Image (cartoon, coloured by chain):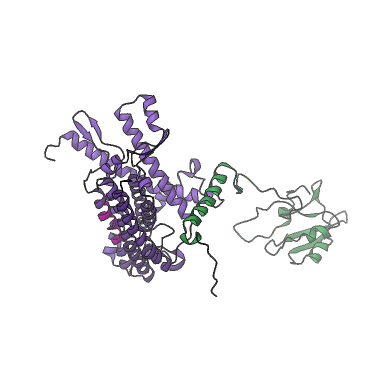
């Protein structure tokens, strides 16, 4: 399709338009040279996320014992079906998860497990640096490290 | 030349070494300026990790270039393939030899000129040598045995020929006004006062007597050095990388270096022909009087003015590169033949008429 832009008399000489363009780049150059650029210099500076940010999982513990009672609500609600729990019984007849695994590769970080949990056990922390060198399944021991403040 | 003493030889060798060292430093410094300058113009930061302000980034780039594998592809003509980068680099180095950084200095019975060779055909020498640079590019494109490289070098030769014409004609105006092709003479002649406006004296710099000529020369210089908006020989989006597509490692770096050295010479030429060359910047003569310095300090101030002017034009090259998009090929040819050529002819006639009327 041929689009004809209307050019004025002076625009046809390029020169005025080139000067206008140079003025724009100069403006940006000086602004960034003496002011602050929008760049966040990552390892030194970090973006502040809200407390509601949904990052790496952890299981909350009270007095060193996990809050989880293996009620199976979170694997039921999980849309990605990434939580695998094997329930067991403690000597005091209380239910607890023998195995609690989260396949993070499948997790979509929707936070529905957190909402479903009646015991405030599973939580999503604000940690977002989760890249690792191999495919990982978070085990119970790993999840029991208290990472967040929720 | 037969009466040259050992001291004369030492001075000559010293000038050669200093000039070469300056030229060698241009590529890494300009690479840094270009990357950080472009970044700031685009609201980024650019390389700032290595050394203060990222200054050592260029050093790391150099080390990387040296230690990279240096293959000669099987389908190329190896001899010309290896020769081409050198052919484009050597003329780039040679051209700067005649550009003066300071006025000739009288020391005792000896006159020291601040350039490698004070040729009386300085400007013609530059044009003669600068046009050799295109052979390197053509050789690179042809020897690479690759259609994109060949297209790039064809474009380059076409562009060089078209713009060399208007470049040469635009300088004719300067030659008429200053009636010399010796660059030292031209720079010295620009020390005269053109107009006295109260306390402000407008010097007889080439820009003030030849504004149109400067415009044409500047545009043609961009085309001659293959810089944006006229970098069609490279044209990444159209012909991959043009003439240096098959090159890697230090051979590619040599092409890049040739580009920056060409920029340096073009900037030096623009400063010498149109902005007074080594004539002092406004305020510097007052500074010289205030210090009460002698001829040596004068030469230093002149060199400082010259390199300040050159630095401005180098920055201008970078500035324009990150402002304007690349021209389409037919637009480039249109501009060269239908606009620049008639304008440069008009400039010659205008200059002649003004000189006849004794205005300049």
Q: What's drawn in magenta, residue-wise?
A: B125-137
Give the image location of residue A142, x and y in percent.
Answer: 71, 53
Q: Considering only vertical position in the picture, is B229 above or below A49?
A: below
Residue drawn at point x = 32 percent, y = 43 percent: B21
Asked whether the viewer can see residue B251, the reply is: no
Quarter of the rendering containing residue A77: bottom right
The chain in purple: B
The chain in green: A
Residue drawn at point x = 34 percent, y = 55 percent: B347
Closest to the observer: A62 or B305?
B305
Give the image location of residue A53, x and y in percent.
Answer: 74, 53
Position of B237 with respect to A111 (left or right) is left
Q: Residue furthest bottom?
A: A1
Residue B279 part of the magenta-drawn span: no
Closest to the observer: B228 or A129?
B228
State which quarter of the image contains the C terminus of chain B: top left
Give the image location of residue B340, x and y in percent.
Answer: 37, 60
Quarter of the rendering containing residue B305: top left
Closest to the observer: B251 or A117?
B251
Closest to the observer: B288 or B72?
B288
Give the image location of residue A9, x and y in percent.
Answer: 50, 61
Position of B112 with respect to A49 (left or right) is left
Determine the main secondary structure of the stretch shown in magenta. helix
Residue drawn at point x = 49 percent, y = 44 percent: B54
Q: Considering only vertical position in the picture, is B9 above or below B268?
A: above
Q: Residue furthest right?
A: A93
């Amino acid at each position: 399709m041929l689009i004809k832009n209307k050019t004025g008399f002076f625009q046809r000489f390029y020169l005025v338009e080139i000067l206008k363009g140079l003025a724009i780049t100069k403006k940006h150059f000086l602004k960034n040279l003496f002011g602050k650029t929008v760049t966040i210099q990552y390892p030194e500076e970090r973006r502040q996320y809200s407390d509601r940010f949904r990052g790496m999982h952890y299981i909350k513990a009270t007095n060193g014992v996990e809050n989880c009672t293996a009620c199976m609500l979170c694997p039921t609600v999980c849309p990605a079906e990434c939580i695998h729990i094997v329930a067991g019984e403690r000597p005091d007849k209380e239910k607890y998860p023998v195995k609690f695994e989260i396949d993070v590769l499948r997790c979509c970080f929707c936070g529905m497990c957190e909402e479903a949990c009646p015991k405030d056990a599973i939580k999503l922390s604000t940690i977002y640096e989760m890249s690792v060198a191999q495919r990982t399944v978070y085990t119970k021991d790993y999840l029991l490290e208290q990472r967040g403040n929720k | 030349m037969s009466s040259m003493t050992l001291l004369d030889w030492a001075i000559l060798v010293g000038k050669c070494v200093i000039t070469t060292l300056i030229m060698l430093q241009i590529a890494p410094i300009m690479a840094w300026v270009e990357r950080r300058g472009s970044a700031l113009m685009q609201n980024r930061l650019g390389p700032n990790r290595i050394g203060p302000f990222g200054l050592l980034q260029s050093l790391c780039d150099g080390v990387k270039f040296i230690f990279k594998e240096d293959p000669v592809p099987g389908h190329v003509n190896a001899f010309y393939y290896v020769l081409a980068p050198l052919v484009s680099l050597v003329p780039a180095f040679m051209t700067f030899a005649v550009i003066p950084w300071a006025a000739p200095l009288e020391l005792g019975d000896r006159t020291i000129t601040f350039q490698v060779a004070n040729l009386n055909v300085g400007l013609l020498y530059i044009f003669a040598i600068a046009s050799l640079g295109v052979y390197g590019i053509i050789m690179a494109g042809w020897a690479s045995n690759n259609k994109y490289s060949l297209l790039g070098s064809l474009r380059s030769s076409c562009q060089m020929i078209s713009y060399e014409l208007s470049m040469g004609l635009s300088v004719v105006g300067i030659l008429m006004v200053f009636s010399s092709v010796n660059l030292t003479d031209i720079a010295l002649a620009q020390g005269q006062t053109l107009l006295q406006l109260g306390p402000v004296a407008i010097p007889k710099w080439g820009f003030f007597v030849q504004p149109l000529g400067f415009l044409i020369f500047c545009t043609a210089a961009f085309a001659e050095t293959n810089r944006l908006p006229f970098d069609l020989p490279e044209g990444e989006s159209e012909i991959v990388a043009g003439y240096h597509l098959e090159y890697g490692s230090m051979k590619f770096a040599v092409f890049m270096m040739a580009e920056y050295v060409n920029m340096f010479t073009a900037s030096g030429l623009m400063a010498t022909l149109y902005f007074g060359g080594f004539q002092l910047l406004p305020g510097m003569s007052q500074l010289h009087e205030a210090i009460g310095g002698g001829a040596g300090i004068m030469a230093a101030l002149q060199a400082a003015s010259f390199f300040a002017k050159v630095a401005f034009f180098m920055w201008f090259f970078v500035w324009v590169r990150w402002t304007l998009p690349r021209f389409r090929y037919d637009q480039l040819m249109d501009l060269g033949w239908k606009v620049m050529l008639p304008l440069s002819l008009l400039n010659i006639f205008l200059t002649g008429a003004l000189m006849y009327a004794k205005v300049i």
